[in-house]
Amino acid sequence: MDQSDLETAYEALAQKIDSVGDEKTELYLAKLALLLAKEVGDLPRVLDCIEGAGKSLD
Amino acid sequence: MRPAGRGEFDSLYFDYPHFDPPEGAARTRLTAPARVAIVGAGPVGMASALALAREGVSSVIFDAKPTLNDGSRAICLARETFYLLRRIGVLPAFEAKSLPWTTGWSYYRGQQILEFRMHDSEEELFRPMYNLEQQYTEQFLWEAVHESPLIDTRWQSEVVGLQDVDGGVELSITDPIETYTLRADWVLAADGAHSPMRRLRGLRLQGENYEGRYVIADVQMAFDHPTVRLALFDPACRPGGTVLVHKQPDNIWRIDYQLTEGKSEEEALKEENVSAAVASVIEEIGYTGEWKLEWWSIYSANTLALDDYRDGRIFFVGDSAHIVPIFGVRGLNNGIADALNIGWKLGWLLNGKAGEEILDSYTPERRGATLDVFDNAKKSTRFMTPPTPGFLLMRDAALSLALDYPFAGDLANPRNMTPYTYAESPLVENDDTAFDGGPAPGEVLPECRLDDGYLSDHLAPWFNIFCFNPALAGEIKLAFQDISDRDIQISVLDFPSKEAAHLGAGENSAYLIRPDRYIAARWKSAAAQDIRVAFNNIICRR
C-alpha cells in the first residue's frame, strides 16, 4: 500500500464515518476493526495494532 | 414458581411422586453404620449411588424433600453423559424419552446469522446433545435406585450435623419422627448449589458472579418445530436482550430471556410479567396456537468452585462443589461426571482393589474439568450478557458483521461440548511419544463405528486393555494372571483395521483404559510388564 492508496483509504473512512452518522460511528468502527482483524489474519499484528491505536489518545 | 392457583408440584405434564420417610421395619436399621452416605437425592446423588452399586458397594441416600425437584431445570444431556448413564444401567429410559439435537440457529435482530452444528458423524453412537426435563432425569434414576438392593434411600431426612470420628463421619439426621445419628466411612455431599453440607463444614465457593440475570420459563405448546437451539440476540420481542429457546419432550418449551437492566427481580418474576414476556417471544418465533405457562425461575451466571472437592472423608459432588453458567450446559453434565468419577474410585478402594491415594485424583480431575468450563463459560457469558460497554460494543459489532460476513457468526457459537482431558492427573501416565496420532492418555476413548457395532461395545465396565496382537495378549494375560477378568478385560482388536488406524496403533501397540473410558496409558510398542506397572500406578498399588 503506497502513500496514494493510504490517502484513498483515509478519505473513504472519513466519508463513511460521516455517512453512517454520529449514532452509528462507534458500532461502525468496531465492526470495521473486527473485519480488518480477520483480513490481516495474523494475531500478533492485530494485537499490536489494538495496542498501538490506543496510544496518545489525549 | 408456577401460575396462581397451582401448587409447587402441580405440573401440566409430570406427576410428582410422594415419598414417605422411613417407616416400620426400616426404622430399626436407621442407625446401622453405612459404608457410604450420600447427601442429596438429586440426579448427582442418585448417579453416585448407582455408580457405587455398579461396583457392588452399598450406600444410604438422604434427602430433605418428599419428592423430586420442582421444575425442568437442567435440560441438556451431553453425549458423554449418555455413556455414563449407560454405565450405570439406566440409558434405555433416557433414549426413549429425550429429544436429540445437533444444531443451533442464531438470530440477530430477526435475521439468521449462524447455524452451528455440534460435532457429529456416522462414527458416533450418540448424538451430541439430548433435551430432557430434569424431573424425568431424576425419575429414571430413581427407578433404578429404588430397585437396587444396595441403595437405601431416606426421604424427608435432613442432615443437620456432622462430626468427624476415627475412620469416618457421624451424621445427625432429622426426619419427621426423630433425630438420630449414623456413622459412615465416607460421605458424598451432593446437596446442590446451596449445599447445607458445605455450610456445616464452613467451606465457601470461590470465584466470580456475573451481572446478567435470566428468567427461565417453561411453556406447554404444540409447536411443530425441529429440536434446535434458538438464540435470539436483540430481538424485537426483547430489544437489547438475549433469548434462548429449547424444545423439550411433552410439548414443553424452555424460554430463557435476559432480564432488562434496572428491573427488580421481584417485579420480573410476577406471573403477568413472565406471561407477557413469554407471549412476545412465542410470537416472534412464529407460533400462533394455544399455550400455557408451566413453571419459571430466575438464574444468574456464576463461576464458583470449592478449592478442594474433598474435606476429610467428605467429597463434594456436582453443584455443591461448583456452580457454572447455564450457557455451556455443563452443570448437570459435569455433576454426573463427578458422580461417576468418585463412584468407581471409591468402589475400587472399598472393594480392596485400589489404594486410598486413588481418591487424591478426584479433585484435580474434576476441579480441572470445572476450571475448563469456567474458561469457556466466561467467553459465552460475556457474549450472552456483555458485562461492560466494551464487551457490549464488540458483541454488537460481531452480530452486526455476521449479517454479511458469516465468519463473525462463529463468535456466537457456544463452546464446551467435548469432555475434559485429564492430562495432569496422577491417574494418567505420560504419553508414549512414539505415537503420531490417535487419542492420548487423559482423553476419553473416541467412538468409532465398526462392522458389528461400535468400538465402545468392546469395553467391559471395568479396566480394559486393547491390543492388536494375539501373542502380546498372551503375555499381558500372564502379567495380569493375579487380577480377575472382572477387574480387567484384555481384548485383541483386528490389525490392520479401521479401529487400529483410529487409535493410531501399530501391531504391537496397547491401550490401557480406565473404567470411566478415560485412556490411562498407551504404548506404541508394548511390553506386558510395562502395562502391569502402569496399572499398578493407576490403582495406587505400587
Image (cartoon, rainbow, N blue to C red):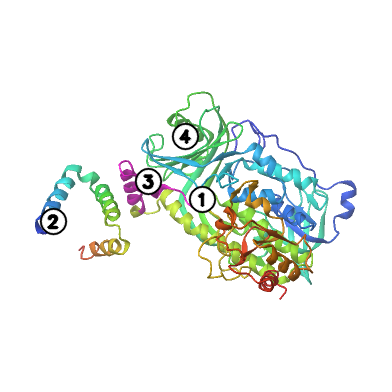
Q: Nearer the viewer, residue B184 or B64?
A: B184
Residue B42: tell me if it is visible.
no
- Residue B465 is drawn in which quadrant? bottom right
Residue B535 image position (x, y, % from top left): 69, 69
For disc 1, the marked residue is: B328
Measured Cα–Cα span from mark 3 to mark 2: 30 Å
Task: Based on the picture, tell me whether residue B16 belongs to the magenta stretch.
Answer: no
Q: Secondary structure at mark 2?
A: helix
Measured Cα–Cα span from mark 1 to mark 2: 44 Å
Q: Secondary structure at mark 1?
A: helix
Q: Which label sits in the foreground, 4 or 2?
A: 2
- Residue B529 is drawn in which quadrant? bottom right
Task: Kindly identify which chain the residue marked by label 1 belongs to.
Answer: B
Q: Which label sits in the foreground, 1 or 2?
A: 2
Q: Secondary structure at mark 3?
A: helix
Task: Kindly identify which chain the residue marked by label 4 belongs to.
Answer: B
Q: Residue at x 54, y 49 (%)?
A: B329
Mark carried by residue A6: 2
Question: Which amino acid is tagged 4?
Answer: Ala
Measured Cα–Cα span from mark 4 to mark 2: 50 Å
Badges 4 and 2, same chain: no
- Residues drawn in magenta: B391-415
Q: Which label sits in the foreground, 1 or 4?
A: 1
Task: Kindly identify which chain the residue marked by label 2 belongs to.
Answer: A
- Residue B73 is drawn in which quadrant? top right
For disc 4, the marked residue is: B277
**Along the polypeptide, which appears first: circle 1 or circle 3?**
1
Q: Which label sits in the foreground, 1 or 3?
A: 3
Residue B116 image position (x, y, % from top left): 44, 44
Residue A7 image position (x, y, % from top left): 11, 55
For disc 3, the marked residue is: B409
Q: Identify whether B292 is placed above or below B320.
A: above
